[in-house]
Image (cartoon, rainbow, N blue to C red):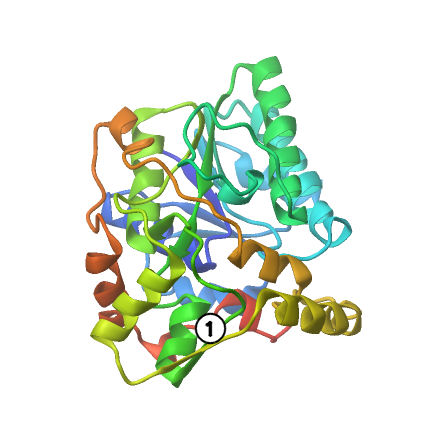
């Protein structure tokens, strides 16, 4: 891993990945769609390239001379499949084809735990994909297209199915810092968790080790959402958690989503957002970490949540979904 391209490098996980790649002595190339967000990369030694997942010409430029691609770009919202397909599915296909044609050796795709349905048992390598949400279907379709491209070209492919990734710049912790967090569910369901710093370090290790395959991943402790927020409250008692029955969240989102869908910008207020927060998606501890021979630096939410609270710097960050500037 010498010459790397990162898509989604000004997003939540992507920015941390770029930081860690720079700390490892690399000068990553970062595909930037909205130029004003490149300011987030100003302190880092990176190569910026203007481009878009919907532009084949810009992707061909982006992958030229690259040996490793970290693909985190795409519409990061739980909207309809029609809204997600152009960037997540078609964009991944374009990028994968351009990478294969350019001789890229290793392609790392940030997929999602939402390729699975609710599971009473922890997700492991034998758990079949069966997405209930459009976001999961889009990610799974992208995995399949990239798999076909990799098989036909000899390019190595890693599909990393990330859980709920949290950190100081996540929307959830922005809500906590503002004093009120809203959760549309009963909170008894479990969900894999991973601090953003560990998500990025995992990607770096995958690139360095040229790992190939498909795997879910999470930290070392399975918790319910109730346990998660109890730990948040333990370290930051000055906020209020508002819970809503899932049916109220779904009804409200069903009313808002058609109204907001007329905008080009992604929206947080969707039916699938509520569905996702109510799926039972624990992940087998150690999955993928053991294959790489490493461990998360923040192995459980007991370490990760206070680290997220410590790292919150409001004036330096605006989540891509909340960034309404066009240029």
Quarter containing the C terminus: bottom right
Image spot of residue 326 (x, y percent): 64, 72
Left or right relative to 50: residue 271: right
Give how far across and how far down residue 31 sits, in percent.
Answer: 53, 50
Label 1: few (<14), some (14–19) or many (≥20) C-alpha neighbours in 10 Å: some
**Residue at point 44% right, 44% down?**
162
Residue drawn 37% across and 75% down? 316
Q: Nearer the viewer, residue 138 or 9?
A: 138
Apparent side of residue 17 relative to residue 107 in the rendered image (left or right): left
Query: Horizontal placement of 173 versus 139: left or right?
Result: left
Count numbered badges in the picture: 1
Q: Which residue is mark 1?
A: 318
- Quadrant of the image for the N terminus? top left
Q: Residue 321 location, x and y as percent?
A: 56, 67
Task: Give the vertical position of 135 relative to 129 (above or below).
Answer: below
Q: Is residue 64 above or below residue 247?
A: above
Q: Is residue 1 visible?
A: no
Element under label 1? loop
Q: Position of residue 238 (x, y in %)?
A: 29, 85
Residue 201 position by quadrant = top left
- Asked if 214 appears above or below 270 in the picture, the reply is above
Q: Observer-nearest residue: 182 or 85?
A: 182
Identify the image quadrant of residue 141: top right
Q: Which residue is pictured at 26% across the width and 69% down the height?
A: 311
In this view of the protein, can residue 36 be seen by the observer?
yes
């Amino acid at each position: 891993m010498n010459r790397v391209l990162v898509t989604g490098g000004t997003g939540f996980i992507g920015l941390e990945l770029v930081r860690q790649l720079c700390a490892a002595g690399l000068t990553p190339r970062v595909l930037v769609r909205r130029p004003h967000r490149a300011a987030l990369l100003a302190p880092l030694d990176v190569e910026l390239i203007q481009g878009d997942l919907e532009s084949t010409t810009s992707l061909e430029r982006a992958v030229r001379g690259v040996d490793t691609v970290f693909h985190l770009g795409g519409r990061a919202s739980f909207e309809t499949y029609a809204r997600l397909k152009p960037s997540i599915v078609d964009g991944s296909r374009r990028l994968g084809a351009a990478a294969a044609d350019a001789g890229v050796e290793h392609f790392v795709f940030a997929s999602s735990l939402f390729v699975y349905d609710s599971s009473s048992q922890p997700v492991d390598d034998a758990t079949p994909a069966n997405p209930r949400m459009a976001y999961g279907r889009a990610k799974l379709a992208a995995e399949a297209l990239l798999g076909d491209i990799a098989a036909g070209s000899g390019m190595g492919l890693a599909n990393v199915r990330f859980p709920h990734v949290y950190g100081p710049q996540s929307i959830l912790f922005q809500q906590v810092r503002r004093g009120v967090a809203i959760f549309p569910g009963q909170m008894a369901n479990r969900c894999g968790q991973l601090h953003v710093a560990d998500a990025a370090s995992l990607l770096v290790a995958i690139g360095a080790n040229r790992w190939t395959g498909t795997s879910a991943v999470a930290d070392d402790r399975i918790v319910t959402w109730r346990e998660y927020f109890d730990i948040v409250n333990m370290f930051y008692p000055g906020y209020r958690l508002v819970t809503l029955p899932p049916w109220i969240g779904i009804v409200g989102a069903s009313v808002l989503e058609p109204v907001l869908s007329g905008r080009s910008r992604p929206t947080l207020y969707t039916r699938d957002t509520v569905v996702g927060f109510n799926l039972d998606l624990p992940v087998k501890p150690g999955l993928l970490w053991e294959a790489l021979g490493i461990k998360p630096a923040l192995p459980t939410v007991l370490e990760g949540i206070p680290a997220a609270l410590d790292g919150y710097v409001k004036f330096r960050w605006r989540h891509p979904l909340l960034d309404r500037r066009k240029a």
